[in-house]
Each structure stands twice: as C-alpha cells, then as structure tokens.
Image: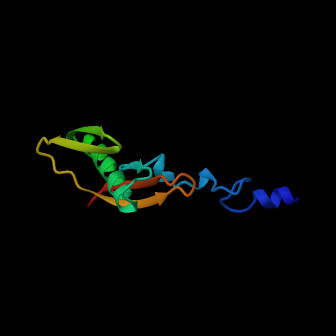
Amino acid sequence: MSLLSACGHLGVDQNGRMDSRNRPAWINDPGEGVSASAGFHVRGEQAQEELAITRARDEYAKRYGVVVSSEHSTSQYVVGERASSVSEKEIREEVNQIEVKASVRAKWKDPDSGMLWIWLVPAN
C-alpha cells in the first residue's frame, strides 16, 4: 500500500523526480506553431530564453520560405598559463517577400534537466 501512495503522488516518479508525462503536449505537438528548446546558458536564464526563441523563430521561418543560415566560429588561444577565446557569428536571411509574424504562446522549463522549451505560434 505504501508503494501505491508513493507512486500516486501527482507529478513525481518513484525516485522523487518530475514525471516526464507532465511535459506540456505542445512540445511534441505544436500544431500550427513550433516548439524549440535551449539548455543551460553560461550567460543566465535570459540568454537561455533568447536562444530558445531564436531557434523557434528560425524553424518557424523555414515553413514560410525564409532561408536562415548561420555560421559560428570559435578560436581558442593559449599563451603561457592564460587562455582566451574569440567567437564570431554571422547570420544570413533570405526572404521572398513574405512577412512572418509569430509570438511566444508558452514557456516551460524541465525541472530535472533545466531545458527551457518555447512554443511559438502564428501572430494574428
């Protein structure tokens, strides 16, 4: 009987972790929109959210004939005991006279992994 009460606790599995079944349905089935995620970001939660939104917007734009390409290069330098890195990112967009408007409908952060999910839907 104690096993049933432990497993029956809403949203928590036997190990005390959030049950993945509590993930919002829109993550796997975003309908007309798109869902995208971003994991931990060294610049904090705001940067994590911006990255997830950028990924969702890029995916959404692809559906409407917008070509988005990006190139990211990182160089690392070590001189003596000091290390530094330089990062460059170039983004190109090619639009075929289509205006694409979307808005964030929902956000959800996985309590176990810290993964932030964004649901982007067409704006009216």
- Residue displayed at 28% across by 39% down: 77
Q: Closer to the camera, 68 or 73?
A: 73
| Residue 22 figure quarter | bottom right
The extreme front residue here reads: 80
Q: Is residue 84 left or right of residue 37?
A: left
Q: Identify the residue at the far right of this view.
A: 1
Q: Residue at x 81, y 61 (%)?
A: 5
Q: Quadrant of the N terminus?
A: bottom right
Q: How is the image coloured?
A: rainbow
User: Which quadrant of the view contains residue 122?
Assistant: bottom left
Question: Where, by quadrant of the figure, is residue 116 drawn?
Answer: bottom left
Query: Taking 79 as reference, is 2 above or below it?
Result: below
Residue 24 location (% of width, % of height): 51, 55
Q: Position of residue 3 (x, y in %)?
A: 84, 56
Residue at left 64%, top 53%? 19
Q: Is residue 115 left or right of residue 53?
A: right
The quadrant in which the C terminus is found is: bottom left
Q: How many marks?
A: 0
Q: Residue at x 39, y 60 (%)?
A: 44
